[in-house]
Amino acid sequence: MGDNQILDEYRDVYQRFAGDGIIDMDKKLQHKFSYQILRLEDVVRQLHGNIPPNRQSLYYVILYKQASCDHSVGYFQFPIEGNTLVVIPQRVIHSILHRSLKCTGYLVCFSVDFFLNQAFPRQHVMTRRIFTSSLRPYLSVSPTQRKELENLFEYLLKESAETNLEKGQMIALKILELLILCDRFFSEARVIGQRPTFHPTIERFYTLIEEHFTQQHSVQFYANFLNVCPGHLNSLMKDTVGLNAKKAIDNRIFLEAKSLLAGTGDSVKEIAHSLGFADVNYFSSFFRKEDQQSPSQYREGLRTRRLLQ
């Protein structure tokens, strides 16, 4: 499939399933691919500037040269006006709402299989710091950094258009170079005094959340596991991520609640219990605090939108 055909299929899936909550693109896309390099202006135009919450087994690196949009990646929500580098790990929920279709830049996405098919070990991708779950996934870039990134993206676009049999290896090499450069830029941002982009305790905290969030909701539980006091954990979270530890836990529970309400036929009571709420009323209060509506109202809204499509 050509780039336009792939984007058309993405647009169709987004439009058909936007009311389903979080879209699992691995299940909804009919045609699979392991690599793609695109200009953002083409992506935004064909997708009409709106990408609903979704997840997929692809890694993304995006360079915004000019933009006006609101981006969400996992636990992070942030506006973008331009000169911004964004990285998205595989299977992390993300969404984008463009306030203007005047957007320029580049997007490259790829799977681990793409590297394996070119005889590259998977650790070249999976051990990159930019794809750790606690990393703040966006970074303002300087004019010099932007130029370095542009050169790599332009090379990828040119190589992707070639027809020689070994272009896959050249593309894999250049993507690896891009990932190393991104790692370097994020590390330099930490060194020169911007908000820290990584902390091993926070990385472990997010790993623990994934393991225990359906049963453990208190900051004290995770702090004990990490051998730190709750106040210190909150301080690290605010410095690294910009939100407190309790909000990080609640965000993960809320994302899962929306996914279960949209994608299963389980009752609200069953979903509440599966997420560690002994009292369904407490779960409803929690959900209403996050979304200004009850779980039943959220589910009914999804059903209404599906009927109208």
Image (spheres, rainbow, N blue to C red):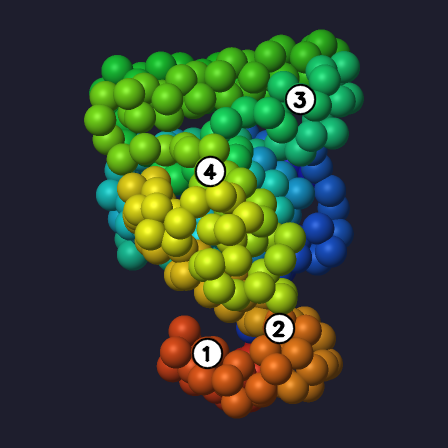
Provide residue 213's location: percent of width, then percent of height. 58, 61
- Mark 2 residue element: loop
- Mark 4 residue element: helix
Amino acid type shown at disc 3: Gln
Q: Distance of mark 3 from mark 4, alpha carbons? A: 22 Å
When the figure is inspected, residue 15 is found, relative to residue 8, above or below; the finding is below
Instruction: Tell me, for residue 276, which label it has, or none.
Output: 2
Instruction: Tell me, for residue 41, which label it has, or none.
Output: none
Amino acid type shown at disc 2: Gly
Q: Earlier in the sequence, mark 2 or mark 3?
A: 3
Amino acid type shown at disc 1: Phe
Q: Distance of mark 2 from mark 3, alpha carbons? A: 35 Å
Left or right? Give the position of 123 relative to 145. right
Question: Dot 3, how many residues are within 10 Å of its Cα: few (below 14), some (14-19), or many (20+)?
Answer: few
Provide residue 135's location: percent of width, then percent of height. 44, 37
What residue would you read off at disc 4? Answer: 201
Q: Earlier in the sequence, mark 3 or mark 4?
A: 3
- Nearer-the-camera pick, 229 or 110: 229
Q: Earlier in the sequence, mark 2 or mark 1?
A: 2
Q: Nearer the viewer, mark 3 or mark 1?
A: 1
Q: Distance of mark 4 from mark 1, alpha carbons? A: 27 Å
Q: Earlier in the sequence, mark 4 or mark 2?
A: 4
Q: Earlier in the sequence, mark 3 or mark 1?
A: 3
Q: Distance of mark 3 from mark 1, alpha carbons? A: 39 Å
Amino acid type shown at disc 4: Thr
Left or right? Give the position of 73 relative to 243. right
Provide residue 127's location: percent of width, then percent of height. 60, 25
Question: Dot 2, how many residues are within 10 Å of its Cα: few (below 14), some (14-19), or many (20+)?
Answer: some
What residue would you read off at disc 1? Answer: 286
Residue in view at x 52 percent, y 58 percent: 221
